[in-house]
Image (spheres, rainbow, N blue to C red):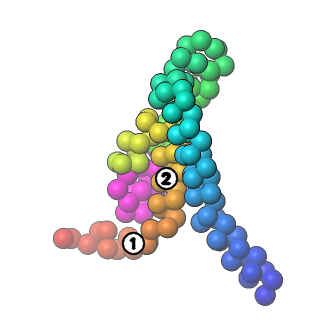
Amino acid sequence: MASATRWLQAQVMKKMLPALVLVPFTVFSAMVIAKEGYFGFITLALREPWGMQVLLDLCIALSLVATWIHRDARERGIVAWPWLLSLPFVGSIGALGYLVWRTWRAPRPLATLAAPR
């Protein structure tokens, strides 16, 4: 029985973790944007080599995430373009939003996706 409880707790945590990260990170990001401006990171990236390195690293990582979202959304019957469009504008917030959306939406059987309309 204890292993079933642990399994259930793990499943709940698996569903909750993206939302638990998304909410405070979005609030923090909004506070930084309010203080520094939306393009404040570009000033930092142009001034500091480490800032540029982090910006380039983020672009590479988001490209990989975009590829994964595109494939995962297609397999699950989720419309991918809003999430892909969000990535260059809100970065990890868009990726976390996709994780929350795909975790909590009702699953659609693949058979219904292939059915003619």
- The stretch drawn in magenta includes residue 25: no
Question: To which residue does mark 1 refer?
Answer: 108
Up/down of 77 relative to 83, above or below: below
Locate residue 61 relative to residue 78 in the image: left or right.
right
Q: Mark 1 or mark 2, which has the lower sequence index?
A: 2
Identify which residue is drawn at 42% across, 60% down: 75
Q: Main secondary structure of the magenta part?
A: helix
In x, y percent, where is residue 53?
A: 62, 21
Up/down of 79 relative to 36, above or below: below
Q: Check disc 2: other Cα within 10 Å, few if <14, some if 14-19, many if 20+.
A: some
Identify which residue is drawn at 47% across, 54% down: 98
Q: Which mark is residue 71?
A: none
Nearer to the camera, 80 or 89:
89
In x, y percent, where is residue 57?
A: 59, 29
Q: Which portion, as a residue range, is magenta?
A: 67-80
In x, y percent, where is residue 25?
A: 59, 46
Question: To which residue does mark 2 refer?
Answer: 97
Locate residue 12 relative to residue 111 in the image: left or right.
right
Amino acid identity at mark 2: Gly
Amino acid identity at mark 1: Arg
Up/down of 117 relative to 3, above or below: above
Occupied quadrant, residue 6: bottom right
Nearer to the camera, 37 or 87:
37
Can residue 60 be seen here?
no
Can residue 4 be seen here?
yes
Asked if labels 2 and 1 touch by Cβ distance under 8 angstroms, the answer is no
In this view, the residue farthest toward the left is 117
